[in-house]
Amino acid sequence: MEEDSLPADLVADLQVQRATPVRGGDIAQAYRLDTAHGPLFAKTHASPSPGMFEREAAGLRALREHCPEEVGVPQVLRESSSGLVLEWIEEDGMPARQTEVALGRSLAHLHGAGSGPGVDGSGTSGDPVGFGGLAGDSHGYLGSVPVDLTPTPSWPEFYLRRRLAPLVTRAVGECRLDPAATGILSELEPRAEELCGPISSPALLHGDLWGGNRLVDTTGRNWLIDPACFWGHPEVDLAMMQLFGGFGPECLDAYQEVSPLADNWRERVPWYQLAPLLVHAILFGGGYGAAALRALTRYR
């Protein structure tokens, strides 16, 4: 692939010698850019959703600001409405025990990043203004599915009304989910506080932490990529990590050494897996809608 096939605003003056397609997810096209100064990573989309790459860049910057140094987050070198250029990570792909321990500890520290300001934070790029988007941003994406990030001081209200209800409505409307899910969610709403579990202040979340969004480099260091960051409940990230696998038991053990989880957290795992299951039902169909309905039904 030639340099002039990539968006000019991303590659201008980078001295790209070759662009090679690499794996980069189901939404964007990803490339290794070999340049005169070393390799870089680029991702682009011919028709991106509004603000998609800008919000990813903001999430990467927030993670870089708050993650312990043990965990790497790629530096954003270029951004535009059509794509990103990031530093290149030379992957090894084989997490060892110490890699899992480092991730668990670092994730616990990351989730503590919002514990000081609480829900009345100042609204700077690093502080939560409630449960919701970075710096009060009201729009975001899970994959390519738009989600409402309008901040609210109540986590149960955010999770039920901003996250689950719109996703259930869309999935039902697109015939990806049994319409019974709408009534079940309404039945559960009065119990939202109980179902969501205790939380005192917002945590900075990766927001889409499945195994493919954790890389391990040739030195054994963890890297977090492709975030869908927002301020929310730490158990959201932990539930996502358990949905598709890819993380060793040492990771969760190390997390709990730093930040012990609340009572009955395991009972809430399917509750917090609902949102990604609904997104997958919308995007891919298959058995994801049935899995989401089963998760909802267990809480009746």
Image (spheres, rainbow, N blue to C red):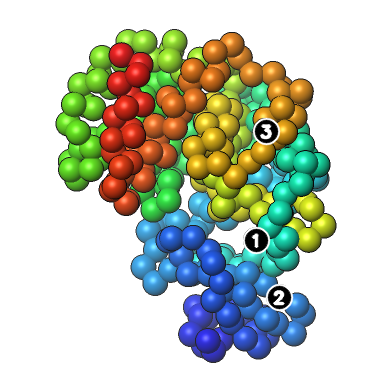
Q: Nearer the viewer, residue 246 or 187?
A: 246
Q: Secondary structure at mark 1?
A: strand
Left or right of 99 in this view: 189 = left
Residue 114: where, in percent of width, then height?
Answer: 65, 28
* Mark positioned earlier in the residue sequence (3 or 1): 1
Distance of mark 3 from mark 2, alpha carbons?
34 Å
Q: Residue at x 43, y 46 (%)?
A: 142
- The residue under label 2 is 39
Q: Position of residue 73 (x, y in %)?
A: 69, 52
| Identity, as a three-letter code, of the amino acid under mark 1 | Val
Q: Residue at x 43, y 60 (%)?
A: 26
- Compared to residue 262, the image places residue 131 above or below, namely below
Q: Measuring 38% from the left and 38% from the top, which residue is drawn there?
A: 277
Which residue in the structure is indicated by mark 1? 76
Secondary structure, mark 3, is: helix
Label 2: which secondary element: strand
Using residue 269 as the reference point, say whether residue 121 is left or right of it: right
Q: Position of residue 275 (x, y in %)?
A: 40, 35
Q: Nearer the viewer, mark 2 or mark 1?
A: 2
User: How far is the residue under mark 3 from the one under mark 1?
Assistant: 31 Å
Residue 202, percent from left and from top: 58, 26
Residue bearing the label numbered 3: 249
Depth check, front residue: 80 or 188: 188
Could you tell me which quadrant the C terminus lies in?
A: top left
Q: Is residue 98 visible?
A: yes
First in sequence, mark 3 or 2: give its number: 2
The label on residue 256 is none
Please rate how many residues cluster around mark 2, counting C-alpha atoms within 10 Å: few if below 14, some from 14 to 19, many from 20. Answer: some
Query: In this rendering, which labeled residue sits more in front, label 3 or label 1?
Result: 3
